[in-house]
Image (cartoon, grey):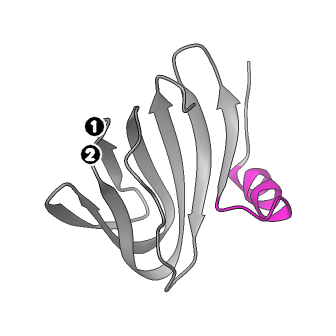
Amino acid sequence: MKAFRLDELEAERLANNGAYLQFLRERTMSVGLYGLDAGTVDPQQPHAQDEVYLVVSGRGAITVGTETESVARGSVVYVPAGVPHKFHHISEDLRVVVVFSPPES
């Protein structure tokens, strides 16, 4: 079994000075923790993989293709491969668990 604690993952993400920390990679998926502070700009480009976002803390909005939705703790968003998407209007620091399938390259 592999088990993780969000507080430890957040500390590791911060120690590595990055917005994204991949913490699990398996044959059919990868999982990471993505952090965007309030007021920052999300630099994402479309990915070659399907992905699911689970917001664990914070508030903002996400646009996927032409649709926009407010997000906060507990929000789950599916983004199909190749579709442009970005978080924006981040009013509280966002921390998001991201699942890619197949694994992010």
Residue 71 shown left or right of residue 103 in the figure: left
How crowded pointer 1 is (Cα within 10 Å; few <14, some 14-19, many 20+) is rated as: some
Percent position of residue 38, x then y: 52, 83
How crowded pointer 2 is (Cα within 10 Å; few <14, some 14-19, many 20+) is rated as: some
Look at discs 1 and 2 and give the one toward the viewer: 2
- Residue type at mark 2: give it: Val
Percent position of residue 87, x then y: 38, 67
CA separation, marks 1 and 2?
Answer: 6 Å
**Which picture quadrant has residue 7?**
bottom right
Q: Quadrant of the N terminus?
A: top right
Q: Which residue is mark 2?
A: 83
Disc 1 is placed on an element classified as: loop
Q: Which residues are magenta?
A: 6-19
Q: Quadrant of the C terminus?
A: top right
Residue 66 shown left or right of residue 99 in the figure: left
Name the foreground residue: 1 vs 14.
14
Q: Residue at x 85, y 62 (%)?
A: 15
Magenta region, main secondary structure? helix
- Residue type at mark 1: give it: Pro
Given the current orientation, which residue lies at the most extreme top position? 27
Q: Residue at x 41, y 41 (%)?
A: 47
Q: Which residue is mark 1?
A: 80
